[in-house]
Image (cartoon, helix red, strand yellow):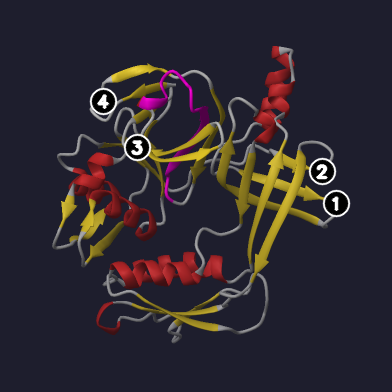
Amino acid sequence: MELFNDMHEKVCNLSGIKEICITSTLKTGDREISFQYRKDNTYANGIKEEAYIRSNEEEFVIKQIEPSGDWYKCTGMMNVEEMEGRQFPAGFETVEKTAEDCCNEAIAGTGWTVTLCGVKKKRTVRIEQNCSAWDVVQQVISTYRCEIKFDSIHKGIAIYEQIGEDRGAYFMERLNLKRLQIQSNSYNFCTRLICIGKDGLMLNIGGKNYLENYQYSRKVKTCTWKDERYTDEESLREDGEAKLDELSKPYKSYTADIVNLVEAVQDEEERERYREVFDIALGDTVLLMSKSTGIRERHRIVKMYQYPQTRSKNKVELANTRLSFEEVQKTEQELS
């Protein structure tokens, strides 16, 4: 990894650091780096807040230095300074435009570009308060229910309906699953959703003004979702169905400590065979099998903690939904 000062002038190639961890989050597309270095490291004085760390794939801005005995812990966030610096003091709005058009308008003049967009639907993005281009792009993720990969070195934004795939990978006790932490609740559970758009726009589905989904339970539990950015009934229904698909089942998430079986194999040909089954990436769907808890379910990888120096510490977070109803309501009430 390379260290640059706050003026983006290269200082050195970093050495003598340990506990490197790169955290990737599906919901925001954000990445974070942390590592430790000794106080007497040759370049310790250059590792400071607002300097830059660059790996082969990402550039980070150092945001925090924490002392711990003879060591310091450094934490950096993905460098999106140009987007954060483009401000919209009076708010931001695009009406019935594609995600690509909305992002291009927000990031104009920042040096960032949309390099790929696989999302074709049109929606309205409205933020009625001071915001940045980064805030707008995050709102695009929520409004269009899409997922984004950021390239902070080449300043590229790739927009997808969904990142990742189902490669047939699985986590299983006594094989590649070392430890499993489980969180499950139904606090935001509902099976019937009343959707309301602008000027009281409501759905009319065979005389019903609500959507239903009984994938988990036949119980009738009604919630209301209101968002005045919707002026078209078809868009209101499409996004309402997607929200209800998540809300009509208990929220489940898992933190799994895993063994990288691919890295453990020495023979290159055999490693390729292992890679077909055990290789994983952010957004992938994996089969989780735990005999001790009785779990055999498919979930997506929503967060990854990768330790390039000590891969035995790698862990992932799995979940069966993107956002809880509470998060959906909070986001849209605050920004609309």
Amino acid beneath label 4: His
Q: Which residue is mark 2?
A: 173
Instruction: Please determine whether, in this image, residue 219 is positioned above or below residue 91.
Output: below
Instruction: Please report whichever mark, 4 or 1, sits nearer to the chain's N-terminal start.
Output: 4
For the record, the magenta segment spans 28-45
Amino acid beneath label 3: Glu
Instruction: Please report whichever mark, 2 or 1, sits nearer to the chain's N-terminal start.
Output: 2
Q: Quadrant of the C terminus?
A: bottom left
| Numbered label attached to residue 6 | none
> Where is residue 266, by image quadrant?
top right
Q: SS class of the residue under badge 4?
A: loop
Mark 1 crowd level (few <14, some 14–19, many ≥20, 10 Å Cα): few
Residue 64 colored magenta?
no
Mark 2 crowd level (few <14, some 14–19, many ≥20, 10 Å Cα): some
Mark 1 to mark 3 CA distance (whole Å) = 46 Å
| Residue 234 placement, left or right of 39 | left
Q: SS class of the residue under badge 3?
A: loop
- The residue mark sitting in front, 1 or 3, is 3
Give yes or no for contact between labels 4 and 2 (Cβ–Cβ under 8 Å).
no
